[in-house]
Each structure stands twice: as C-alpha cells, then as structure tokens.
Amino acid sequence: MFQKIRELSKNLAIYGLGDVSIQVVNFLLLRVYVQYLSPEDYGILALLGSVEAIAKLFFRWGVDGSFMRFWYDCEGDRARQRLASTLFFFLLGLNGLLLIASVALFAAFILTLLPEPSQNSSSLLARQLS
C-alpha cells in the first residue's frame, strides 16, 4: 500500500512540476513580451489563444478522460492495446478530416475575422518598407 502512495506522490510531483514550470517560463517571458511586442501583437496572441481554446474542445473530443476511465476496466494488455489503438485511429481520422476542412475554409474564415487593410495603410506600409 505504501508503494502505491509513494508512486502516486512521485507522479503527482512530476506532473505538478511540469505545470508549474510552464507557468514560470511564461512569467519570465513577460519582460520579453512587454519589450518587443506591440499592442497589435498582443491582439494577435489573444486571437490565437481564443482559437486554441475552441480547437481544444474539438480536437480532444473528451477522449482523454474517457481513455483514463476505460483503461482500468480492460481485463488485460491486449484489451488495453485495442482501446488505445481504437482511440488513436478515431482521433487521427476525425481530426484529419477537420484539418482538411479548416484548411479549405481558411481564407473565408480569415476574411470574416480580419478586415482587409485600407488603401492608406497599404501605402503607409509600402513607404515604411522602402
């Protein structure tokens, strides 16, 4: 019993340190973000974060939680391998179809999200580049 508790606490520490280390790196990068990013860049990062949060819902499909739940119901290694491979190929096929559809609809999606630049801004950009 103590071995299971020790193993649990070891795994908890490993995964906990992984989550904490990501947050520490993000905090340390804050100075870099403030120095080098413009307000427009922050807007782009916020937009990417929003898209990522929505995409997580579609690309994970709640399978991670169900996988952990059904893993312990499997009676042997063969059943666990079948469970893992079934979920893997399900996610691969479904997310592949979603990827193909999103690439096909990318241009229309971008045009609705971001307006086209005006003539003044494009001429200003051309002057800055030359």
Image (spheres, rainbow, N blue to C red):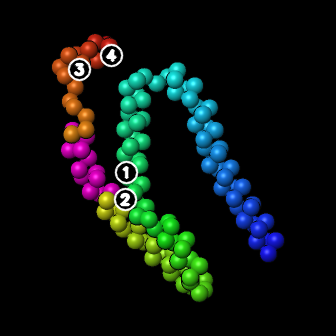
| In this rendering, position of residue 86 left or right of residue 130 | right
Q: Residue type at mark 2: give it.
A: Phe
User: Which residue is the site of mark 3?
Assistant: 122
**101 versus 25 height, above or below:** below
Q: Residues within 10 Å of mark 3 (few under 14, many from 20)?
A: few
- Label 2 to label 1: alpha-carbon separation: 7 Å
Q: Nearer the viewer, mark 2 or mark 3?
A: 2
**How far apart are the alpha carbons under marks 4 and 2?**
40 Å
**Main SS class of the magenta portion in the image:** helix
Q: Work out whether residue 126 can be spotted.
A: no
Residue drawn at point x = 55 percent, y = 71 percent: 68
Q: Which mark is residue 72?
A: none
Q: Is residue 80 left or right of residue 8?
A: left
In the image, residue 59 lies at what x, y percent?
40, 59
**Residue type, label 1:** Ile
Q: Residues within 10 Å of mark 1 (few under 14, many from 20)?
A: few
Image: 42 above or below 67: above
Front residue (pair 114, 70): 70
Taking the spot 35% from the left edge, 66% from the top edge, the residue there is 94
- Tag on residue 58? 2
Residue tagged 1: 54
Where does the image place residue 42, in percent across and percent down from the top left? Answer: 42, 29
Per the image, the residue denoted by label 4 is: 129
